[in-house]
Amino acid sequence: MTARKADICLPSRTPAYVSREIGSAEIGVSPGTWDKWVARGILPPKAPSFPESTPRWRWADVDARLAASNRVASSGIAGQLDAKGTNYSDPFVASAHKFADVGRKRRRKARVGD
């Protein structure tokens, strides 16, 4: 049975190797999201030295992978940030969002000039 994020007591420091429950609670996502991110390559694969019954992730690898993802996202390579700081990782969606904002601005100017 999976524990709820709110019920997991985080240790005073992040251990060198974390379970999916502790790791997901540390970054504020559900264990299911943790699993999806591992499958997509957002998070590194589990450490090979642990048995299948108790998988663990090396926290330094998790931290490094997330930091690298943040650098790519903030550089504009993976997407763009709008004025509210929302990251659109798909360039097509980012372009469509810009186009939608332009239309709103034109309508506002038309109303003011009437």
Image (tube, helix red, strand yellow):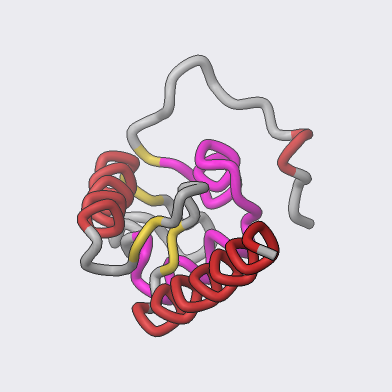
49 horizontally vs 6: left or right: left
Query: Extreme front residue here?
Result: 114
Q: Position of residue 20 (x, y in %)?
A: 54, 52
Quadrant in which the C terminus is drawn:
bottom right
Q: Position of residue 25 (x, y in %)?
A: 59, 40
Which residue is drawn at the image coordinates 26% and 40% (left, top)? Answer: 60
Which residue is drawn at the image coordinates 55% and 47% (left, top)? Answer: 24
Q: Position of residue 70 (x, y in %)?
A: 30, 50
Quick one: 18 or 109, which is closer to the camera?
Answer: 109
Inspect the magenta stretch and tell me whether residue 15 lies in it: no
Quick one: 74 or 63, which is closer to the camera?
Answer: 74
Inspect the magenta stretch and tell me whether residue 35 lies in it: yes
Q: Is residue 67 above or below residue 108?
A: above
Quick one: 49 or 19, which is closer to the camera?
Answer: 19
Which residue is drawn at the image coordinates 39% and 78% (left, top)? Answer: 95
Query: Extreme bottom residue here?
Result: 92
Quadrant in which the N terminus is drawn:
bottom right
Q: Is residue 17 above or below residue 48?
A: above
Q: Position of residue 48 (x, y in %)?
A: 29, 62
> In the picture, residue 18 is in which quadrant?
top left
Magenta stretch prevailing secondary structure: helix
17 horizontally vs 109: left or right: left
Looking at the image, how many numbered discs can be counted on the residues?
A: 0
Q: Tell me where the magenta segment starts and ends, as one range.
A: 18-43
Q: Is residue 26 above or below residue 71?
A: above
Q: Is residue 2 above or below residue 37?
A: above
Which residue is drawn at the image coordinates 30% and 58% (left, top)? Answer: 73
